Amino acid sequence: MCGIVGYLGKNRAADILIDGLSKLEYRGYDSAGVAIIENSDIDVNKCKGRLANLQEKLKEHVLDGKIGIGHTRWATHGEPSDVNSHPHTNESGTIAVVHNGIIENYLVLREWLSSEGYKFVSETDTEVIPHLVDYYYEGDLLDAVMKAVKRMEGSYAIGVICKDEPNKLIAVRKDSPLIVGVGKDESFIASDIPAVLNYTRDVYLLEDNEFVLIEDKGITILDENKKKVEKEIYHVTWNADAAEKGGYEHFMLKEIHEQPKAIKDTLTSRVVKGQKINLDSINITKEQIQDIDKIYIVACGTAYHAGLVGKTAIEKLAKVPVEVEVASEFRYREPLINERTLMIVISQSGETADTLAALRLAKAENARVIAVTNVVGSSVSREADDVLYTWAGPEIAVASTKAYVTQLIAMYIIALYFAENKGSIRQSEIDKIKCGLLNLSEEAAEVLNQKDIIKDFAKKICNDKDMYFLGRGLDYAVALEGSLKLKEISYIHSEAYAGGELKHGPIALIEKGTKVIALATQEHLFDKMLSNIKEVKTRGANVIAIAMEGHDVIEKTVDSAIYIPRVKSLLAPILSVIPLQLLSYYVSIEKGCDVDKPRNLAKSVTVE
Ligand code: F6R
């Protein structure tokens, strides 16, 4: 939800800010803007729409200033428009602010500031910040920002510059991500690491309520009492290329193709043939595992779908009851949590507001929390008791693909780890699953080889208005993910149903030519699924099936079939989701949609 950047150094700030924003556009693309100190004044340029619009504007208005801030917006308060775009300034234009988050008490502040004579031009919550800083400004920007922040409730990562102190950039975060890039004679702030990777690999990962003072002489980090905070530099080991398209037309296609590697990286050193699961990063003891009497898996969207697979894996292998919950619902329903409850939160970004709130709720009730996340140093990783990183590498496309399969891997690893510690199933069974996991990377690559067949299917279905995904057991969990993928990037209405549930209502929607994607990879449910497929075929549906090799008998019933390698049913979701990801991708391309930046969406949902 919104991306912010800031720069102070020896180079043209405009170029560096625009480059940084281009790496953060996945966080929102309703508008973009920069504020740069130019000839002793703050020069603000901003406009509605994609970053390209701003770039076009800046072609005619070249800026040479060496300090500035920038913003790419996902609109919450106020429609996408030029005036609602960031940066926002005080009335005299001497203070400029970029903000990611929501100032929850902005109406109260706005009313009070208005009574003090301040005039507002936008509908945003953010605009109160430059006015507040102005109110407190007495010649020391850091001081004024610190005082302003004390009045603000909600979430924020902000960058502030001031005309009267042209060699200072101030930043602070609370519940919204912010990192500081440490360059040679130049410093950066950004919502995410890829924005600075072209310039430095050394970053500080900020904690909540830490202030950053960037000056020519370097970076100072302070706590809310102005006490200097000594922080270790985090050296980024992955390449800037990891956050580039690398020859692919879209990030999503690249990330789909990175899945074999992501699976391997997430397994490496944790799952080794003939050895116990090795989870160095997890401190939970054998006794604590044995004491757990309930697990909540809490997440949103795709990560929630990964949790559904996690439930089956943990219940089957570790024999502990698991409830999977959508984070935005969980936090408001007084769930039963105690010290024998374990919560597993799953979040690619590690910043999703509802997931973070659920984590905090669990901690407040003395439950232990394991975070499964892809972003090192993210909020959930810092606040959970244990972290299991998914080593998917940066995921840039808004539609999650490689993060999902690595979340599934993480779920299998946790399930096996618990099973080993509890002795809940036979070691021989555990060993078979480990072997299965270790083969998945190559098998995923085999599925990717079928992309041309899937491309042809996409051509046949791209003009449909509605589509249905069916599956039983784990196939139902994957059906939900396939359906989400299709709607978010191709805007085709689709729904996922459990195969057996159809006749309780939704089958009324099936008519001649209705497209149905049926997953039939679960060995023990195959015959039942075949019956469900026949039910929709009889009513005229056109069915594409995803099945395991060896189940080609399905061709007698369906119109077309895509096969995945034969694996244990428990592990099939890792492979069966890939054709669905590719199908959504190619349908989106056929329809001419913006695959990586679907309308109304942002990658990281840091507001409720
Ligand atoms: C869909 C998608 C979203 C996210 C959800 C949670 O493709 O990406 O549904 O899965 O917003 O995000 P994280 O995992 O960052 O908490």
Image: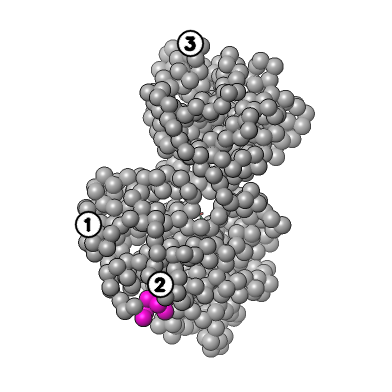
Examine the rendering and report whether any part of residue 218 can be seen: yes
Name the foreground residue: 364 vs 117: 364
Residue highlighted by disc 3: 138
Amino acid type at image mark 2 = Gln
The one of 386 and 59 positioned closer to us in this rendering:
386
Q: Which label sits on residue 275?
A: 2
Tell whether label 1 touches label 2 (CB within 8 Å).
Answer: no
> In the depicted view, which residue is nearer to us: 505 or 486?
486
Question: Which numbered disc flags the more N-terminal residue, 1 or 3?
Answer: 3
- In depth, the one of 554 and 16 nearer the eye is 16
- Establish whether ligand 1 lies closer than 8 Å to the Cβ of label 2: no
Q: Disc 2 versus disc 1: distance between alpha carbons?
A: 28 Å
In the displayed structure, does residue 163 sit left or right of residue 116?
right
* Distance CA(mark 1)–CA(mark 3): 53 Å
Label 1 secondary element: loop
Question: Looking at the picture, how far across and down is residue 174, in whole percent?
Answer: 42, 34
Camera-nearest label, 2 or 1: 2
Residue at 68% x, 27% y is 10
Q: Is residue 471 left or right of residue 17?
A: left
